[in-house]
Image (cartoon, rainbow, N blue to C red):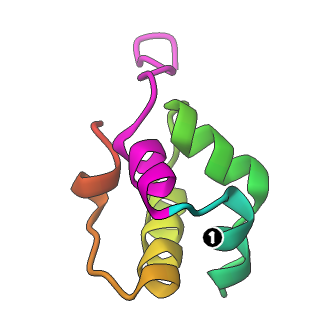
């Protein structure tokens, strides 16, 4: 991964969770895919995540909020 950027800065996911008053644990609790607190934190702070982990976060936030968020709503990369 020498030619790929690893840090992308704070992601829209962080702002959305703040506005909704949700914590990382709320997404972990809503997930049925084995999402961890560490994965959510990395996603919020902009550390590169695999598409699979991004999809787990999207599914968890949609479950927790009953909204239809997409990957592009939550991540800028």
- Residue 64 percent coordinates (x, y): 52, 82
- Determine if residue 31 is in view: no
**Dot 1 lies on which element?**
helix
- Residue 45 percent coordinates (x, y): 55, 32
Residue drawn at (26%, 80%), measured in percent from left and top? 68
Q: Which residue is mark 1?
A: 27
Up the image or down, 74 lies above or below 20; here it is above
Please say whether residue 52 is one of the residues in the magenta stretch.
no
Count of marks, rendered view: 1
Please say whether residue 9 is one of the residues in the magenta stretch.
yes
Going by the image, does 53 lie left or right of 29? left
Please tell me which residue lies in front, 38 or 27. Answer: 27
Please tell me which residue lies in front, 6 or 12. Answer: 12
Question: Could you classify mark 1 by the number of other residues whose Cα lies within 10 Å: few (under 14), some (14-19), or many (20 or more)?
Answer: many
- Residue 31 percent coordinates (x, y): 64, 81
Q: Quadrant of residue 4?
A: top left
In the image, the segment drawn in magenta is: 1-20
Residue drawn at (25%, 55%), measured in percent from left and top? 73
């Amino acid at each position: 991964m020498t030619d790929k950027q690893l840090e992308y800065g704070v992601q829209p996911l962080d702002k959305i969770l703040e506005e909704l008053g949700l914590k990382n644990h709320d997404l972990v609790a809503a997930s049925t895919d084995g999402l961890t607190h560490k994965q959510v934190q990395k996603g919020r702070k902009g550390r590169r995540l695999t598409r699979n982990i991004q999809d787990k976060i999207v599914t968890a936030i949609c479950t927790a909020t009953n909204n239809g968020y997409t990957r592009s709503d939550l991540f800028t990369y």
